[in-house]
Image (tube, coloured by chain):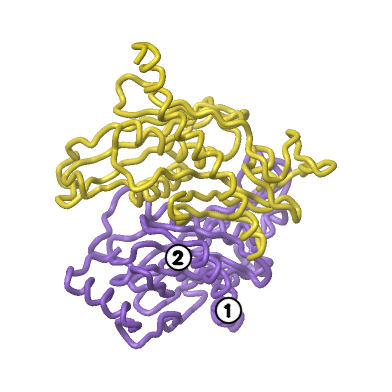
Chain colours: A yellow, B purple
Amino acid sequence: MEGGEKPELIVNGKRLDGRDFGELRSLKIEAEVLKNADGSAYVEWGNNKIIAAVYGPKEALPKHISDPDRAIIKCRYSMAPFSSLEEHGRTGPNRRATEISKVTKEVFENVILLDRFPGSEIDIFIEVLQSDGGTRAAGITAAAVALVNAGIPMSDVPYAVSAGKVGDKIILDLNKIEDNYSDADIPIAISPRTGNVLLLQMDGSLTKEEFKQAFNMAKEAGKTISELQKSALVDPYRKLAEKYKV
Amino acid sequence: MAKISAVKGEYIVELLSKGIRDGPRKFMDYRKITISQGLLPNAEGSAQVDLGNTKVLVGIKMGVGEPMPDKPKEGNLMVNAELLPLASADYDAGPPSPESVEFARVVDRGIRAAGTIDLSSLFIEKDKVWSIFVDIYVLNYDGNLFDAGTLAVMAALLNTKMPRYENDAVVREGEMPKLKIGSIVTSCTYAKLGDKIIIDPTGAEESVMDARLTVTNDEQYIRAMQKGLNGAFSYAEIENLLEKTFEKSKELRKVLEGLKG
């Protein structure tokens, strides 16, 4: 939310970029984009460009942080200093990134079968190369694909998307301008198999009824996002099969 | 989170599954809340909140500085939280942990989203605005820092007096009007253990909880939400807790409204 002159975000029942209230931006997901990482994914979500990589499971270091019963997850969400339309950002994690890294880690602690790898660590790196609103949701969606691509056993492949409020209208997948001037911003991560909410944050102003609407929009969008995640995961194998004419 | 023995942890969960909470409370009861204001006269505002054995102190200082480049006409609000090593055997000195950063940011978001402080009223002149520094000091940890912290920040803000800015200097003498406060916000934090949900968890309860949900509201709106930890909530659970929050927050708001300032 931002001060200053608030632009008209909804004109003639359409959003500034021409979308309907419940419409996702264009979304492209590609798996296995980095050689060194055990798993990786690249997401273009509207103007967001985000790359995620997974290393591990490997020995948890330093030793004293390891858990003899299960794997631990290290997660780093970070925005490149050149990623925003505004000025050059500070390098390294700030307080916002620290918090996003924490809640992202907690999403994956829910679905990764951690007890399969005692004493190990699994590293999740999310780098935002270009940002246009909704980067934490896009990062989680990308990291989920990278984890599967790394062969990490999981109970489900979560997705995330943000909903929000402009005036009295609930809208899906806010871009940067909408995010800056919205009346509420609600990032949500869902485990599609159970419908469980793994991440929920919100600030602004919202009624219970509006939350319901926002949640249902996010859930509906999840069908599309999950499909794209799945096809991104299959794609590298389909290409291999074509190459060797299997 | 406090470290407790496995036996104690199992005992808490086992009891809850039978519908009983360790201690005299019911699932949706808060512990006793005691608030005192103005303990630190050097600070522009201060308050201490005791929520059961959780003890949180907030000091507020005001200074003159530059506005944020993207908000040239608004004052700055900065909320910081310190999990002091003296507050728990599990807290270490050193750089802020992700827990303390999350704590400060969740408290900040609720107050900011509700417009509790009219930041545009803190504008002095071009490139010069008031900055409000809110520091949350945790003196004793026994769970539910979020609610104690939000209460303490609100109580301290209600106690804050505005210095004057005269001849390029901050003057903290003579007539100091109270800082203008818009809507009062409070937060309600819930812990989920197994399929049971309780409000205002103690340190021991937090050490065995699966998931946490904090809902900050004013009289009209939900102002902030934050789900934490690796457990999950169903939509139905969240919907219930939103409803519960509008009910329970009345108790908290009453405590704040009873303060003299």
Residue B233 percent location from the top left of the image:
45, 61
- Residue at the image position 30 percent from the left and 49 percent from the top: B94
Residues tagged 1 and 2 counted as in contact (Cβ below 8 A): no
Vertical order, B21 against B4 (above or below): below
Q: Quadrant of the N terminus of chain B?
A: bottom left
Q: Name the secondary structure under disc 1.
A: helix
Judged by depth in the image, the label closer to the viewer, 1 or 2, is 1
Residue B138 percent location from the top left of the image:
38, 65
- Classify residue B93 as left or right of residue B257: left
Residue A43 seen in the current view:
yes
Q: Which residue is mark 1?
A: B247
Residue B232, which numbered label?
A: none
Q: Which residue is mark 2?
A: B146
Count residues near mark 1 (Cα–Cα under 10 Å), then give few for <14, some for 14-19, many for 20+. Answer: few
Residue B46 seen in the current view:
no
- Residue at the image position 75 percent from the left and 39 percent from the top: A15
Residue A73 percent location from the top left of the image:
29, 44
Chain for numbered disc 1:
B
- Residue at the image position 67 percent from the left and 55 percent from the top: B119
- Classify residue A102 as left or right of residue B47: left
Q: Name the secondary structure under disc 2.
A: helix
Q: Tell me the distance, in whole angstroms, between the alpha carbons under discs 1 and 2.
A: 18 Å
